[in-house]
Image (cartoon, grey):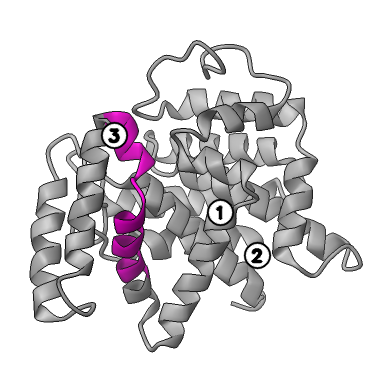
C-alpha cells in the first residue's frame, strides 16, 4: 500500500467493502436487478481517479467531482454515502501531507477539516446530492436538498443526523467511522481475513443500530426488525460456524427483494469509510 495515491486508496476501500459477502448488499455473488458488482468496481475506479485529479480542492468540491464521475461512469448512485464520508478524510490526509507540523493524527486533522468547511462546501454537497438522487429522502420543511443550500453545512448535517448516520458523522467528528476502523483492524489481528472482518462486523453493526437507509426507505419499524434479526444471527454461534452460516443465509435472503428495500446501504458506507481510515493510518 506504500506509494499508493490517496485516490487509489479510496478506490481500494470501496472495492474491498463491496467484495466482502455482506447480508443484503451487492457483492460478487449477489446482484440487484438494476445494480451489480461491476457497477461498484467501475464507480470506484472513476471516483478514485477523480479524487486524485482534484486533490487539494475543498471537501465540497471533492464530493461534487466524485459524484459527477460516478454518475458519468455508471449512470446510477452506487456510492453517494461513501463519497460524503471519504471526502473529509481525503482532505484531512492531504492537510497532514502538506504540513507535517500541523498534526500526525488523522482524527485531529479530520476535526480541523470539518470546522473549516464553508458555504461553498454546502452548495457543492447539496448539488452533488441532487445529481445522485438518493432514495428515501422524502420531503422536508427545512434543509430540503431541493432547496437552496444553507450557509452552514453543519446546521444541515445536525438536522439530518436525527435519521441519517452519514450526516451524524459530520457532527460527531466521525466517531463511528473511527470506531469501525479499530474494530476491523482488531478482527483482522484476530486472524480473520480482511473480507471476513468486514462480513463479521456488518452483522455486529446491524445488531447494534438501525440502518438509516432502510429506516428512510421502509420505516423505523422495519429497520428495527432488521436489527433484531441481525442480533439473532450474531447469537447463533461463533462467526462462520455452521449455525451462524445457516442463520446468515436465511437473514440474507430475507433482506433481498426486487426493489432491494432491505439493503443496509448506510452500514456499507460506514464500513467503506472505516476501511479507508484503516488504510490511511497504515500509510
Report x, y in % for residue 200: 31, 70
Residue 210 in magenta?
Answer: yes
Q: Is residue 88 left or right of residue 12?
A: right
Contact between marks 3 and 1 (CB within 8 A): the answer is no
Q: Which quadrant: the C terminus? A: bottom right
Residue at 57% over, 62% down: 178
Q: Secondary structure at mark 2?
A: loop
Does residue 190 sit above or below 139 in this rendering?
A: below
Residues in magenta, as a range: 198-217
Instruction: Report whether residue 261 is seen.
Output: no
Label 1: which residue?
Answer: 48
Please identify the quarter of the rendering in which residue 279 is found.
bottom right
Q: Earlier in the sequence, mark 1 or mark 2?
A: 2
Q: Is residue 173 left or right of residue 96?
A: left
Q: Secondary structure at mark 3?
A: helix
Mark 2: give few (<14), some (14-19) or many (20+) Cα within 10 Å. some
Report x, y in % for residue 126: 58, 25
Residue 74 in magenta?
Answer: no
Label 2: which residue?
Answer: 5
Instruction: Report whether residue 58 is seen.
Output: yes
Residue at 40% over, 24% down: 137
Which is more foreground, mark 2 or mark 3?
3
Amino acid at each position: 500500500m506504500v506509494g499508493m495515491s490517496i485516490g487509489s486508496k479510496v478506490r481500494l476501500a470501496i472495492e474491498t467493502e463491496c467484495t466482502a459477502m455482506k447480508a443484503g448488499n451487492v457483492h460478487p455473488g449477489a446482484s440487484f436487478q438494476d445494480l451489480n458488482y461491476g457497477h461498484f468496481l467501475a464507480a470506484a475506479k472513476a471516483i478514485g481517479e477523480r479524487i486524485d485529479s482534484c486533490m487539494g480542492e475543498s471537501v465540497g468540491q471533492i464530493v461534487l467531482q466524485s459524484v459527477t464521475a460516478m454518475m458519468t461512469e455508471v449512470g446510477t448512485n452506487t456510492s453517494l454515502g461513501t463519497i460524503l464520508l471519504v471526502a473529509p478524510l481525503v482532505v484531512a490526509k492531504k492537510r497532514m501531507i502538506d504540513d507535517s507540523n500541523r498534526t500526525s493524527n488523522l482524527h485531529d486533522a479530520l476535526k480541523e477539516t470539518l470546522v473549516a468547511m464553508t458555504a461553498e462546501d454546502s452548495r457543492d454537497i447539496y448539488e452533488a446530492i441532487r445529481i445522485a438522487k438518493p432514495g428515501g429522502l422524502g420531503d422536508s420543511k427545512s434543509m430540503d436538498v431541493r432547496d437552496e443550500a444553507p450557509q452552514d453545512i453543519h446546521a444541515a448535517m445536525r438536522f439530518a443526523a436525527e435519521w441519517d448516520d452519514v450526516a451524524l458523522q459530520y457532527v460527531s467528528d466521525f466517531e463511528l467511522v473511527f470506531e469501525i476502523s479499530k474494530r476491523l483492524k482488531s478482527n483482522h489481528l484476530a486472524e480473520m481475513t480482511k473480507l471476513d472482518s468486514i462480513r463479521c462486523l456488518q452483522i455486529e453493526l446491524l445488531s447494534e443500530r438501525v440502518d438509516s437507509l432502510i429506516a428512510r426507505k421502509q420505516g423505523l419499524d422495519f429497520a428495527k426488525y432488521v436489527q433484531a434479526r441481525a442480533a439473532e444471527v450474531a447469537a447463533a454461534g461463533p462467526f462462520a460456524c455452521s449455525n451462524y452460516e445457516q442463520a446468515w443465509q436465511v437473514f440474507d435472503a430475507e433482506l433481498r427483494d426486487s426493489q432491494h428495500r432491505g439493503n443496509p446501504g448506510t452500514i456499507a458506507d460506514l464500513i467503506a469509510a472505516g476501511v479507508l481510515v484503516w488504510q490511511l493510518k497504515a500509510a
